[in-house]
Amino acid sequence: MTRRRLLGLAALVAALLVATGAVVTTRLVANRPAAPVAGPSTAPPASPTPAPTTASPTPPPGADLKGPLNLLLVGVDTRVSIPGWEPHADAVLLLHVPAGLDRAYLFSLPRDLVVDIPTYPKARYPGGRTKLTHAMSYGSRVPGDKRNPSTAQGYELLRTTVSRYTGLRIDAGAVITFGGFDKLVDTLGGVDLYVDQRVESRHRRPDGTMRTLTGGGYTGPQMVYEKGTRHLTGWQALDYARQRYTAGGDYTRQRHQQQLLRALARKILDQGTARDPQRVEQVVAALGRTLVYAGGGRNLIDYAYVLGGLPADRLTLVVLPGAGVSSGGAYRGEQLKPLGRDFLTALRGGRADAFLAAHPSLRVKN
């Protein structure tokens, strides 16, 4: 089993935040007990009294949240059937919402990005310079309990590492595993996605069953995703977006994951899911225990409400170019090229639109 087999599913969290915000909030307000209605009365009318002052309406959840907001979305490479397996950050995505809260930018950091991971006493990790993915696994270690690593701890160390690298304050985030992903997509009736290049699956046969894994790799017929607009079922969407042995490698996989997010967001909005409480319950139930939310003291509903009105076409996908890092002729990891680091500087300074206009190659168009 390869080290980077599983799709970075964290992107779905952003889609669900966008989708469920208005509904959950509406239901909370709608389910409040109604004031009793007075019936007929034979009592003499009371003396005239001044009209009561109309109470101010209760502000919606998250009304005090102001931009910019940064959400860290993490998909973990985990083998739930193996006791003690430490979760690895298979995908690390950041959703940046500027001060106006009317648009958003989604970009990925390479899982093999070479970064400085700080010390983390909870896991007795001394700190070091290594791949970003390891922040999740090192942070998840629970001293004295190797069989039960803590995903929440792993996220905490990863969040600190990402924040220090990007210079962005992380307001909230979530970790999601592969479990339930195909069911989620199927609950939505599948997803329409533009396949931007021919992709051969390493893991699946055309009928969806797993290919045979031998000592020399996978064997047997392969599922192939041809270029063009395709309707994908749950297992197909998961399989397509996890493939990294393609032209462009892991950077192509990052782009495909982002495209899947946008397609899901459009699907949710087009179906009117955000205005159908029963459909929202189905979507959230499909995630089940595969989702770990970290809100920094704020309720998920607060962020959901704020993002609930964000149109899918105002979600800009950004690709940060990178390159491999070698030491002594051996591959060590990845680094962002200057253009990618300059985008982060522009983002922090509120100049993302102008920067992308000057460097249109950073936009993911499909």
Image: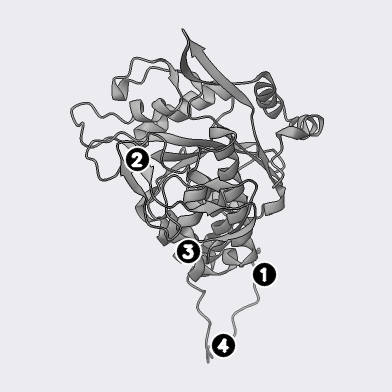
The amino acid on which the numbered mark 2 sits, given as a three-letter code, is Thr
Residue 99 bears which disc, if any? Answer: none
Judge from the rendering whether residue 173 lies leftward or rightward of residue 350; answer left or right.
Answer: left
Name the residue carrying label 4. 44
- Mark 4 or 1, which is nearer the eye? 1
Name the residue carrying label 3. 186
| Residue at mark 3 to residue at mark 2: CA–CA distance | 22 Å
* Residue in the image at 45% along x and 65% along y: 282
Name, please, the residue furthest toward the left.
Answer: 144
The amino acid on which the numbered mark 3 sits, given as a three-letter code, is Asp
Q: Earlier in the sequence, mark 4 or mark 1?
A: 4
Q: Position of residue 58 (x, y in %)?
A: 59, 58
Q: Position of residue 117 (x, y in %)?
A: 43, 19
- Mark 1 or 3, which is nearer the eye? 3
Q: Quadrant of residue 50?
A: bottom right
Q: Quadrant of the N terminus?
A: top left
Q: Earlier in the sequence, mark 1 or mark 2?
A: 1
**Nearest to the observer: residue 42 or residue 68:** 68
Residue 51 bears which disc, if any? Answer: 1
* Residue in the image at 32% along x and 20% along y: 121
